[in-house]
Amino acid sequence: MSITAIPFFSHSHHRLKVNDASFPLDVLSFEGTETLSAPFSWNIIFTSADKNISRETMLLKPASLTLLPSPQSLSELLHKPGPLRVVQGVVTGFDALGVSADEARYAITLQPRLALLARTRQNAIWQDMSVPQIAEAILRERHGMRGQDFVFNLSRDYPKREQVMQFDEDDLRFVSRLLAEVGIWFRFTTDTRLNIDVVEFYDGPQGYVTGLTLPAVPPSGLHDSGVESVWAMESRFRVVEKTVSTRDYNYRDATADMNAQADVTGGDDTTYGEAYHWADNYLQAGEVYSATPATESGAFYARLRHERYLNRQTQLSAKSSSATLMPGVVVRA
């Protein structure tokens, strides 16, 4: 007669791990907020048999949330399929929520290490450096980040600026503002080999992740057989600015024409009006009719500003059960 051990099954489909934590952590619920060009924030509520977890054992500790699929069969339960997604970061908040006879309930806030830049406020002058160089210097010199912690994947060359001032700004706001001025955006990924969060910087669509296709099927009944889908899709359209005009003054060449204009609608007759911007701090007007004007020229800033206005023209929303859907991922339904 042989006895086969019954496999242990936890109703918590997801795993929370905090470095150096010797006590068990059982995920109860979680809620995450993610956008492009901003640190994500996951609020994770968990229980533990340890009723005396201190803030010293949690705050600033590297941590990860592993999202696992719900087993659809005994075979999947036994073979333990791989994770759907791993969110890596650092604990920036810790709450003790209550204690019962059997366990205690806690909550942590999981964010990328880039979020810690908001805890450093400085006044500084940067000279003869480009925007990417300033951002990298802050990451490396002030916050000890190394090459594996961030990646610049840029399609343009950015000129050195004579002087850039940081006045009473925290590092996150300062870096985010500088990057946004020239159209550089960022998103976060996970290095599963080093178990760290990585921030990736891009200045175009080369940073988008393609290949995700989901069926447009609304949930029906109480069982979806584990098939990820998208539903409740809505489209919203608005009238936005038709053109953008910029103007500046270069004291070194007072007679130079510093006017620039951009219209990247391609003749869209549902746009209206003109947005005028003064003093974007450029030294040359640039080629108005070029699809790729010189970086940080007047035409460059006019085109970039018009793209931002057009971004509000069409907005799509939907609900999805896909755990792999995140900012920067292009989904087709």
Image (spheres, rainbow, N blue to C red):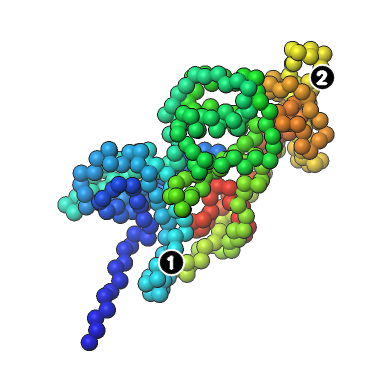
Vertical placement of 229 versus 139: above or below? below
Label 2 sits on residue: 257
Residue 242 position by quadrant: top right
Q: Is residue 241 visible?
A: no
Q: How many labels does the image show?
A: 2
In the picture, which quadrant includes the N terminus? Answer: bottom left
Q: How far separated are the C-alphas under marks 2 and 1?
A: 63 Å
Neighbours of disc 2 within 10 Å: few (<14), some (14-19), many (20+): some
**Quadrant in which the C terminus appears:** bottom right
Q: Residues within 10 Å of mark 1 (few under 14, many from 20)?
A: few
Q: Which of 107 and 127 is in front in this view?
A: 127
Instruction: Identify the mark nearer the N-term, 2 or 1.
Output: 1
- Secondary structure beneath dot 2 equals loop
Position of 294 with respect to 224 (left or right) is right
Q: Residue tagged by mark 1?
A: 81
> In the displayed structure, would residue 305 be above or below residue 128?
below
Image position, residue 136 (x, y; %): 55, 33
Q: Is 33 or 81 nearer to us in this picture?
A: 81
